Image (cartoon, rainbow, N blue to C red):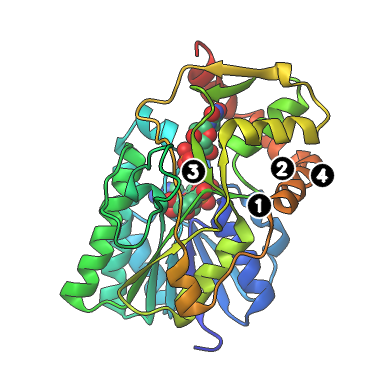
Amino acid sequence: MEHRTIIVTGGAGFIGSNFIFYLLENTEDHVVCLDSLTYAGNLSTLAGVANHPRFRFVRGDITDREAVYRLFEETAPDVVVNFAAESHVDRSIENPGVFLQTNIIGTQTLLDACRKYGIQRYHQVSTDEVYGDLPLDRPDLMFTETTPIHTSSPYSASKAAADLLVLAYHRTYGLPVSISRCSNNYGPYHFPEKLIPLMIINALHDKPLPVYGTGENVRDWLYVEDHCKAIDLIVRNGRVGEVYNIGGHNEMRNIDIVRLIVHALGKSEDLIRFVADRKGHDRRYAIDPSKIHRELGWLPETKFEDGLQKTIDWYLQNEDWWGAIISGEYQTYYQRMYGDR
Ligand code: NAD
Ligand code: TYD
């Protein structure tokens, strides 16, 4: 599969853009990014590769069947990696409809295109949130690939539905698919509505740091580049029809992350505010990544303390990127989400 043509959907978002940078730097692949540029997609993120000879950006919606088919006809992709999604749990609680549309119908549209035009591999970027949550007092429990799907939010329900469709297209039509379910990512170009960038940016402005509930909820954090390497490995060497969990055994309580950020920026913990909890808030996510380690030799490379420092430095050095975002529609979102919380 040398010199493949890869369609990367959602490549103007956080993880998709990092994946594109990874591919352009480490492979000879030709990369076509398909992204509709929702509030979460930013062309400025891709500015550094816009003129790269092996890169092309196409603005389009994965639910737009005509546009998707046209792109497949034009580019004859060997591989499709689908990152395109509505990705924020809080927004899914406010307005589930667009999550079902993009995450489920969009996935179906891409799968249909793969059937129609043929493909070497369709890879679905999924999430550990499809497994629901784990209790806080059972640190021995972790999600494996055989943990039952048991979703909590409209976001995770839509991602789970998409996973089931992907597996159905494999079983029914023999489509060569794979799925990865990763834990929480962090790193450069993370949209400011998510925990880590939100806390960095608020702390820089000496604004209150809104911690949901008691702050004891646990997430299993992975540096985005480690996720990108894992996806690349699965697409190349992972078995067709299989699900691979990705995570780095790095469980942290939200409150501890917020404190680390406050201290790294030399700010005061007085900025922390405990606010109304998220509805249906998942307590703990924890990934057992032994399958991808055993089968593909993948291990995370970035330690959390290093990754967090790199991330903080990136936000300090890239105010142009996030400044443009938080001065726009984000203001209205922030007011709506946190105004009376
Ligand atoms: P993001 O919200 O930063 O980016 C999503 C991108 O998809 C944006 O560029 C947006 O414009 C694009 N998009 C949305 N709807 C589209 C549509 N209908 N057609 C075309 N493009 C569309 O998301 P992210 O954090 O980079 O997540 C990427 C994928 O990884 C998602 O599928 C998400 O479920 C999954 N995931 C994320 C995490 C995480 O911690 N962020 C963890 C595990 C899995
Ligand atoms: P988030 O980054 O939205 O990711 P996810 O919900 O997909 O795990 O949130 C991570 C954790 O941080 C989650 O437990 C909710 C919590 N959180 C806050 O406490 N305050 C906030 O302002 C945000 C955005 C999240």
Assess mark 1: CB under 8 A from ligand 1? no
Q: Is residue 257 above or below residue 166?
A: above
Residue 60 versus residue 335: which sits nearer the camera? Answer: 335
**Which residue does the numbered mark 4 point to in the structure image?**
317
Query: Which of 257/243 is in front?
Result: 257
Query: Mark 1 or 2 closer to N-term?
Result: 1
The answer to whether residue 4 is above or below residue 48 is below
> Residue at (80%, 40%) from the top-left corner?
316
Measured as percent of width and height from the top left, residue 29 is found at: 58, 79
Q: Are marks 1 and 2 in contact (CB under 8 Å)?
A: yes
User: For mark 3, does the 10 Å Cα neighbourhood hold few (<14), some (14 to 19), or many (20 or more) residues?
Assistant: some
Q: What is the C-alpha distance between the residues marked 3 and 2? A: 16 Å
Helix, strand or loop at label 2? It is helix
Type of amino acid under label 1:
Thr
The alpha-carbon separation of the residues under discs 3 and 1 comes to: 13 Å
Which mark is on residue 38? 3
Q: Which mark's residue is nearer the viewer, 3 or 4?
A: 4
Q: Which percent across, then down, holds residue 57? A: 56, 62
Q: Are marks 3 and 1 in contact (CB under 8 Å)?
A: no
Instruction: Give the SS element for disc 1.
Output: helix
- Residue at disc 3, CB closer than 8 Å to ligand 1: yes
Residue holding disc 2: 321
Most distant residue in the bottom direction: 2
